[in-house]
Image (cartoon, grey):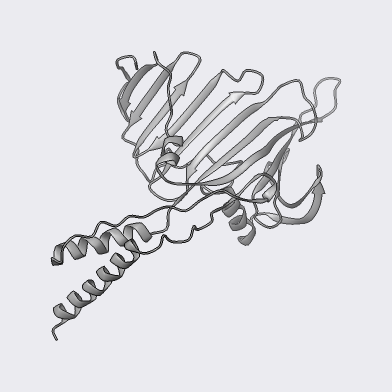
Amino acid sequence: MTPDDEYDRYLDDFGGRLRSAATGPPPRARRRWVLGVGGTLTLAGAATAIVLAIGGGAAGERLDVVAEARAALAPRGKILHLVAYGRLGPPGVRTIEGGTRNERWIAVDRPRRWRERSAGVRDPGNVFERSYARGVLRTYTAADARLEVRSGYSEAGATARPPALVDIPGPDPAAGLQRLLAGGRVRDGGELRVRGRDVRRLVVTSSTAADRRQRIVYDVDPDTFAPVQVQITNVAGLPATSGRPPSQVRTVFSVVVTRYETLPDDAAGARLLRIATPPGTTVRTSRVGTRPRPAPVAP
């Protein structure tokens, strides 16, 4: 038996198994677990029916069956969905400013795709959105109903990288925090109870100058490293003036994560990565290195 005959027999055998699978009982549903707020696990998925259309016995058709099977059995990617509220002042302390609500959808796998939506807590209609996919950055401003579409970006450039959550590297903050801890770039502050829940505290302290210090505290789920809240404290020294001794200015900015979950990177997930503009939106297109030019108003 030649190697070609052996390979043909393998394809025939594999095709027969696929036919049996297609005509047999449906596979059991595979459960998909999604991380919800507070690190709890909730059931979020259901079975996906896979239908394989198998033709005749030609070698080309058998190869198509193999390709279809590989595509169907390949693991699906995921989209990270995160909602966070940022404002001046420590977490849990009421301030005059309402702060900002930020929502993100980030495809964890390549090619890079992401969308970010921000709005004021006290002014939810004042929306600002950005999205990136396939070298194109889109920016939408609700205040003037305008969409900027700029192409020509490199997949390896800074624009393609998804927005980071307070200096956490990578598209997934939980994985990024684990890398920071493993690399010794954050100090493990141990587990404690904060605002009624158990967290693990990771701390970064740095000095940009003799009179400037910054401290970032990441409180994460002890088991999954999903971010719960982040507090950034900056201390800057002020020089002495006539009749006034040297002093310090301390500012605190906090980010509270209220939703952190993974969604399937399927057709529905792809829609979440795109900006949906209302009728009447003005669209301007441009390419990196050129000036924007107006386009017809979106219907």
On the image, the x and y values in percent for residue 281 come to 40, 16
**113 lies left or right of 152:** right
Q: In this view, does 25 lie above or below 166?
A: below
Instruction: Residue 295: give x, y in percent of width and height.
Output: 30, 17
In front here: 243 or 62?
Answer: 62
Q: Which residue is pictured at 26% across the width and 61% down the height?
A: 67
The front one of 15 and 225 is 15
Which residue corresponds to the image point at 26% horizontal and 64% vertical from the top-left? 66
Would you identify the image quadrant in which residue 180 lies?
bottom right
Quarter of the figure that contains the N terminus: bottom left
What residue is at 32 percent from the left and 62 percent from the top?
23
86 displayed left or right of 10: right
State the image quarter where residue 212 is shown.
top right
Residue lying at 82% horizontally and 20% vertically, measured from the top left: 242
Q: Residue furthest bottom?
A: 1
Residue 2 image point, x, y percent: 13, 84
Q: Quadrant of the C terminus?
A: top left
Position of residue 102 relative to residue 294, above or below, is below
21 to 200, vertically: above or below: below
Q: Which of 248 and 64 is in front in this view?
A: 64
User: 298 left or right of 1?
Assistant: right
Q: Where is residue 63 in the image (x, y as percent from the top left)?
A: 20, 64
